[in-house]
Image (cartoon, coloured by chain):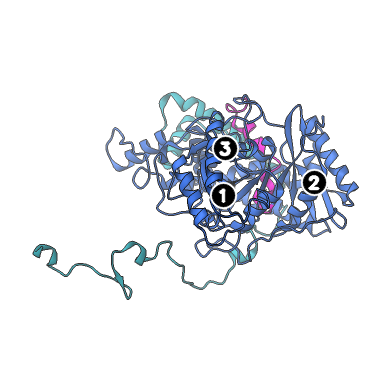
Chain colours: A cyan, B blue
Amino acid sequence: MTIGLDEVLHVAKLAELAVRENELRRLVDQMNRIVDYVATLDEVPADRMAEPFLAGPESVALREDVETAVPLAHPPASVAPEFVGGFFLVPRHGAMEDQ
Amino acid sequence: MTASTAGQRGSRAGMVAAETGKKLANAGGLNAVLHWSQGLLDAEGARVDRMAAPGPLAAVPVVLKDNIVTVEQPTTCASRILEGYVSPYNATVVERLRAAGAIIAAKTNLDEFAMGSSTEHSAFGRVQHPLDPSRVPGGSSGGSAALVAAGVVPAALGSETGGSVRQPASFCGVVGVKPSYGRVSRYGLVAFGSSLDCVSSFGRTVDDAARVLSVISGPDPLDATTVDRPAMKLPPALPDLRGLTFGLPREYFPTDLDEGVTSALRRTADRIRELGGEIRDVSLPNSAYAVPTYYIIAPAEAAANLARYDGVRYGQREVGPEGDIRALYRSTRGEGFGDEVRRRILVGTYVLSAGYYDAYYRKAQRVRALIADDFRRVFGSGIDLLLTPTTPTTAFKAGEKTEDPVAMYLADVFVCPMSLAGLPALSLPVGRSEGLPVGAQLVAPYFEEERMLAAARVLEHSLDALAEVR
């Protein structure tokens, strides 16, 4: 597999990454080196199969699909000047203009 | 960190903070620290001295890799794109360390966004190896490893995606422990490869690293990937290794393995036998494909995770010549990320792009499953722990691999497979080759950290890690 200059520019555009003109040639060479290397996975016989991998124990990926309450990192009361009964207290409408 | 440290009161933490400040100042030449101040250290010491109930890490100074967010110090990930960024919250691991009485001493240098194996890819300069300034400390958690090795702190936090704690631990001659995936909360760890990332610990001794891990482990409602199991217990004190069977995977002992590494591992295996452990040859045939698999999956996940750094929400912003929002994204990311991060974003985007997804990403996922299956099979055949070298060589020279990314990637050849499989593993110093530390790696089945650490402690007490083995 050879990656050309146009392909690197296209991928850079997809990745929202500006690439400087003077580094393009080096980048193309290094991309080819990496992609050629990872293509060594082609050596693994296609019929060699295993159960799909789940990162960590199955309980991580296969926990029950139910919604659970997740506490906020910063409860509203800790960041609001006044928080009562689940409501943010704000100045009465027009009160700011009165002052 | 010793038993005598824990539990002392009065101004003990204040004195430790003052002493740690002096050590950090003296270690400045390593370039291992990105953020610290004596003022913050003193405040940490005072906070710990005021604690009513000293915890298991009372007055123990700990440094954090600078991809773990903290309120009181910036978090840059050693990247220009996050220069000056201060998190509005602490990572869960930071809160747990503080609650246990630890003194958060400094934030440490790393390869930018934890991408690298030498800590040369930092926007703030490379970290020097504490024993030989011309060499690298390994990476990406090289700053944390170097500070523990230099005796500045007894323990540190790093992060692992593909070996970034075990590899520098091996190079620097300290203990580095990667827990099972899901054992430690990642809330507040800046994301790199989400199916791989683990907060991990360094220690001067097995006990130091284990104590830190026991404090930070356990479920966290703020991280859905943590497993609902109690925190890790401190490992039991074993008199010897009787009853334990160690597997030596033949693929991890190639004929061209560095002579010093080979000698150190042979000596370790001999000592295991002397201590009553059984050694068996095993095979993990698909581990040979771990590095190419990793360098598809990790960049793919990184390309997605790092999409958030766009100049709008975080850190540095560059307005492009075209003056529109896309130009802002591209200029910010083009200027803000360093060479290695940009390379990985490009590779990750490439392997996920239409036309290449099946050829690369889908195939890598299939091989990842094969690699994990090998471990499952071996551990299911009566093997309690695996013994391998941590790295194929000792610490290499700075600049030796920076021009060839694949040569750099191969420095992680023995640590990548466990990351892909999500298994716990550690690196233990087991000797020196031409004056440089050599690490042996122990690998355990999921959630068998206590067994792995207990065996490592027996070996630690019976092997002279400073002995020349070549």
User: Same subunit under labels 1 and 2?
Assistant: yes
Magenta range is B400-424
- Percent across and percent down for residue A62 are 59, 67
Label 1, on which residue? B12
Closest to the observer, B96 or B365: B96
Q: Chain of mark 1?
A: B
Dot 2: element: helix
Q: Is residue B393 left or right of residue B108?
A: right
N-terminal of the pair, mark 1 or mark 2, is 1
Residue B14, compared with residue B262, is above or below; it is below
Residue B55, compared with residue B105, is above or below; it is below
Q: The residue under label 1 is which amino acid type?
A: Arg
Q: The residue under label 2 is which amino acid type?
A: His
Quadrant for the C terminus of chain A in the image: bottom left
Q: The residue under label 3 is which amino acid type?
A: Gly
Closest to the observer, B84 or B120: B84
Q: Which mark is residue B319?
A: none
Quadrant for the N terminus of chain A in the image: top right
Closest to the observer, B207 or A58: B207
Task: Tell me what residue is drawn at x 82 percent, y 32 percent.
Answer: B469
- Percent across and percent down for residue B158 are 58, 45
Label 2, on which residue? B461
N-terminal of the pair, mark 1 or mark 3, is 1
Label 3, on which residue? B143
Dot 1: within a 10 Å radius of its alpha carbon, few (fewer than 14), some, or many (20 or more) residues? some
The magenta stretch spans residue B232: no
Residue B358, compared with residue A35, is above or below; it is below
> How far apart are the alpha carbons under marks 1 and 3?
26 Å
Dot 1: element: helix
